[in-house]
Image: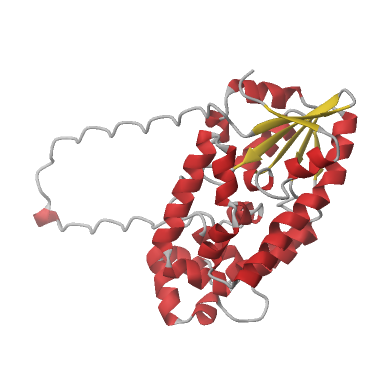
Amino acid sequence: MQFRSTIALLVAALGAASACRKAEPAPQQKPAEVAAPAAAAPAPAPAPAPAVIAKPLLWEVEKDGKQLQLLGTFHLGVDAARELPPWVWQRFDAAHTFAMEADVMDPSLLAALRRTDGTTLDQELGAAHWAKLEQAIGADTAARLKTLAASAVTTVVMTHGLPPTAPMDMTLLERARAGGKAIVYLEPVDVQVRVLRWLDGTTLKAMLDDLDGTRARNEKGLAVFRSGDAAAMAEMVAPAEWKAMFRRSDAEVAQAMDEMLYRRNASWIAGIEKLVAAGDAFVAVGAGHLVGDRSVIDLLLAKGYSVTRVIGQ
């Protein structure tokens, strides 16, 4: 779901993305109570490697003989290093420039995720919802998040049920840096800061009240992404899905979509046009920005660009 945006990556940077229960230490037995050693349990079988995504959401954008690659990502839950097929990585490695949404390590964005008013998150949520947060992510983890803004913790809860992979966007960024590519960001960091207002305590409480729904939407979104079905992905960013997640009025949902999706799509076009004109660029943004009404692809088509879905080599 696209409203996670690159803000979700910041939680990992702050050390808060490890939202999982820690195993309780086993109680020590007194010497007289030590049992005879049992036979060693067989080692658990290694987890199967994730399947390679056969039809990643990749398009080629072309005009006047110049082109770039445009990849839709699923910010958390996909192991890009193992799940993207080799032919995608070949196109990535051949590009001289890598572009993504924003610089998620900018200090001003990191600062926006910390509380500055002297309160703590448990005070903002109240006892009932704080208890739900502890139940969802574990009391120890919740305690470590008390000094963060609700928006930071909302991004943690929004990943409920997703596999604990490295963020897809960061995997791409690290490989781009290792390959000596030029790095371009499509929007200034203050845009990311502004959209934090939609991930407030109201949204966090709504998600804590419907964790099963959050998990179900995440599992469905991940399955759709891995299937490569662009039409189904467009349904995942429709207004009904936003309303189910945010639990707000139709007017508020429309405003949130405008600020978090449509305006940002439009603001990226000028930068993408420059990258096309320069040639040899690989752009990666959340898949929700590339499908549905007023998507980046629709806007490029309207400006006369040829946009072709890439399926295989």
Q: Is residue 205 above or below residue 102?
A: below
Residue at (74%, 47%) from the top-left corner?
A: 101
**What colour-coding does the image apply?**
secondary structure
Q: Classify residue 90 as left or right of residue 41.
A: right
Across the whole image, how many numbered discs are drawn on residues? 0
Residue toward you, 174 or 48: 48
State the residue at coordinates (63%, 47%): 288
Answer with left or right where residue 210 lies relative to residue 269: left
Find residue 6 and report its horizontal and vertical position in percent: 66, 52
Q: Position of residue 71 (x, y in %)?
A: 68, 35
Q: From where the camera sits, is residue 113 visible?
A: no
Task: Say which of 99 and 45 sits in front.
Answer: 99
Q: Answer with left or right where residue 306 lies relative to residue 290.
A: right
Quarter of the picture containing the C terminus is top right
Q: Is residue 266 above or below residue 132?
A: above
Q: Residue at x 51, y 47 (%)?
A: 221
Q: Is residue 125 visible?
A: yes
> Could you say where residue 158 lies in the image, as x and y percent from the top left?
52, 58
37 or 92, nearer to the observer: 92
Q: Residue 154's x, y, as percent?
A: 55, 64
Q: Is residue 309 above or below residue 35?
A: above
For this rendering, which residue is in front, 207 or 127? 207
- Left or right of 118: which side holds 190? right
